[in-house]
């Protein structure tokens, strides 16, 4: 009996043993491969998070926490890398959920040094508006965005994504909208630079302006964007060239939208001939996350990407614009966000923008 009990104990194993052979002692710890990087938006810190000796760094229920004086900011789940263009001191913790939420017993401090030199590109933001003709509160957001654009001309390139909502079919909806709208539970919603999940802005002007300033302060542009578009009326085809120059050698993606202004159509809580602006007619890029340039983009060397698109009947060419965004990653490739953007009327061009 003693031998049997011993064998059973041996076979059952220690209750703290994990499937991957690590030992779970109930304590979550965080470490980093380096604690000093440059603020070039490229060099990154990679974190390792362990529960005992069990590595949970890439688990879907792990997220890093950036500790700030103003409060804690949760990074996306499964993200274990960090880059930034803003010098300073950054403090990180980790959270992991396995039956219950655990926070690391320690913190990691990362020093980010400034990078000297480089061109001072004017930073224009991509604003993503989610709306519908069936949404009662959506006109209020459109009014707010128009006011901000009037007060801060040239700062925002707005792309308005329509969808079916409130039991109404929206004729301006596109397939791209549903792919972008993941986790968006209500309308209206507004986001900056594809940075979905940070602040779900609705229509409060002061909040949208505050987040605009945070975006400019926390995510400065490391690249400039120029746009060239040529329209062929005979076959209603537009050829678009996105141009990019960068302060740093980095991986970039190019994302192109075609938008139309001045569309007259019904709007709930609006009118039968309500004017819909910034309506996304098409995502010209082959991917909603942009198309990657071949290899890395070298600092100071212009790179270009060219795409063509045939306009559908009924689209008013005179009211259309081209929006070109250049995307980068700050988390090792888990997500891509807009680093800078530019726009022009369809058939025209827009040069690089610089700070005065």
Image (spheres, grey):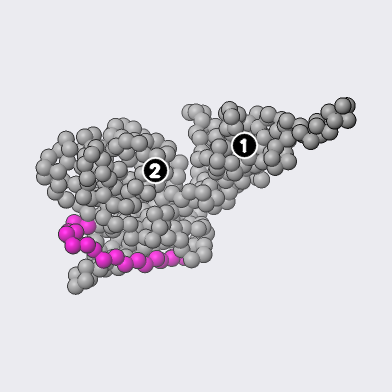
The answer to if 143 sits in the magenta stretch is no
Disc 2: CA contacts within 10 A as few (<14), some (14-19) or many (>=20): few
- Element type where label 1 sits in the image: strand
In magenta, the rendered stretch is 300-320
Distance Cα–Cα, label 2 vs label 1: 33 Å
Does residue 154 appear in this view? no
Label 1 belongs to which residue?
109
**Residue 174: percent from left, percent from top:** 29, 52
Q: Is residue 195 visible?
A: yes
Numbered label attached to residue 120: none
Q: Which picture quadrant has residue 269?
A: top left
Residue sitting farthest toward the bottom: 234
- Give the side of residue 156 with respect to residue 3, left or right: left
Residue drawn at (50%, 33%), measured in percent from left and top?
73
Callout in the foreground (2, 1): 2
Q: Is residue 54 left or right of residue 1?
A: left
Query: Which residue is located at x 83 percent, y 28 percent?
Result: 5
Tag 2 secondary structure: loop
| Badge 1: residue crowd in 10 Å (few <14, some 14–19, many ≥20) | some
Q: Was residue 317 drawn as part of the magenta stretch in this picture?
A: yes
Q: Quadrant of the N terminus?
A: top right
- Residue 228 is situated, as x and y percent measured from the top left of the image, at 31, 65
- The residue wearing badge 2 is 182
């Amino acid at each position: 009996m003693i031998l049997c009990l011993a064998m059973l104990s041996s076979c059952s194993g220690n209750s703290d043993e994990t499937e991957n052979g690590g030992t779970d002692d109930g304590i979550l710890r965080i470490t980093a491969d380096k604690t000093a990087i440059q603020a070039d938006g490229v060099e990154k810190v990679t974190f390792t998070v362990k529960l005992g000796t069990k590595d949970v760094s890439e688990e879907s229920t792990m997220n890093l926490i950036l500790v700030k004086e103003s409060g804690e900011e949760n990074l996306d789940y499964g993200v274990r890398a960090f880059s930034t263009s803003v010098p300073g001191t950054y403090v990180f913790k980790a959270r992991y959920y396995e039956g219950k939420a655990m926070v690391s017993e320690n913190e990691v401090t990362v020093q980010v040094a400034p990078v000297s030199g480089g061109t001072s590109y004017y930073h224009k933001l991509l604003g993503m508006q989610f709306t519908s003709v069936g949404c009662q509160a959506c006109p209020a957001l459109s009014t707010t965005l128009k006011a901000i654009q009037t007060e801060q001309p040239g700062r925002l390139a707005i792309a308005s994504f329509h969808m079916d909502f409130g039991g109404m079919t929206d004729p301006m909806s596109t397939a791209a909208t549903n792919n972008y709208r993941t986790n968006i539970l209500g309308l209206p919603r507004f986001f900056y630079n594809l940075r979905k999940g940070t602040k779900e802005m609705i229509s409060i002007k002061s909040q949208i302006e505050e987040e605009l300033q945070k975006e400019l302060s926390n995510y400065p542009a490391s690249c400039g964007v120029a746009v060239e578009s040529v329209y062929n009326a005979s076959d209603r085809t537009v050829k678009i060239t996105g141009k990019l120059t960068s302060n740093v050698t980095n991986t970039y993606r190019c994302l192109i939208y075609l938008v139309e202004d001045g569309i007259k159509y019904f709007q709930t809580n609006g009118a039968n001939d309500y004017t819909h602006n910034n309506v996304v007619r098409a995502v010209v890029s082959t991917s909603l996350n942009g198309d990657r340039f071949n290899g890395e983009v070298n600092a100071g060397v212009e790179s270009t990407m060219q795409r063509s698109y045939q306009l559908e009947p009924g689209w008013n060419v005179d009211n259309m614009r081209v929006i070109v965004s250049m995307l980068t990653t700050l988390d090792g490739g888990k997500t891509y966000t807009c680093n800078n953007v530019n726009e022009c009327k369809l058939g025209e061009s827009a040069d690089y923008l610089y700070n005065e």
